[in-house]
Amino acid sequence: MTKTPLDAIDLKILREVQNDARIANITLADRVGLSPSPCSRRVKLLEEGGVIEGYRAVLNRPAVGLGLTVFAGVRVERHAQDQADAFVEAVLSMPEVVACHLISGDVDFLIEVVVPDMATYESTILRQLLSLTAIRDIRSSFAMRSYRAGGALPLSPARPSKT
């Protein structure tokens, strides 16, 4: 990850690329107030620095047969690093898990699972999770409707440095 602070132009580039990852460099350059070559160099530096991790298409979940989104709060048996590591390793191997967060509060982890239906969640994911010895409890909540999933990050304007 880059340690160089992001300036106003970098933030403009990131906002534009978040909204349209397929934007042509010439259009991007025009929108951020650069000529194409410097704009392309900045994008490359943002990629190389790990600020831009990758590009992907955002798919309509029900349109591709994934009509159920589940948020599962998971408590591990003990707060031991090996238990947490085993859980994370198992969860990250499940393609249905689209997000996994270590959180504070009543549960230790919050995972987002996307599957075709309740039967698939119960027969594959829930059974896989319950087979892990590290898990003490799972609390599942089901999204009834999603208004925004995978939205753009709220990038604030560059702050002037205090010198």
Image (cartoon, grey):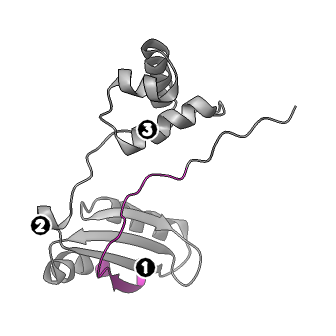
Name the side, left or right, on which 106 lies relative to 89. right
* Magenta part, dominant SS: loop
Q: In this view, does 97 lie above or below 1?
A: below
Determine if residue 133 is in view. Answer: no
Q: Tell me whether circle 3 and circle 2 mark residues in contact (CB < 8 Å).
A: no
Q: Tell me whether circle 2 and circle 1 mark residues in contact (CB < 8 Å).
A: no
User: Which mark sits nearer the N-terminus, 1 or 3?
Assistant: 3
Determine if residue 73 is in view. Answer: yes
Where is residue 26 drawn, in percent x and y?
Answer: 37, 20
Q: Is residue 37 above or below residue 1?
A: above
The residue labelled by disc 2 is 65
Whole-angstrom CA distance, mark 3 to mark 2, is 30 Å
Name the side, left or right, on which 25 lies relative to 39. left
Whole-angstrom CA distance, mark 1 to mark 3, is 36 Å
User: Which mark sits nearer the N-terminus, 2 or 1?
Assistant: 2
Where is residue 55 drawn, in percent x and y?
Answer: 33, 39
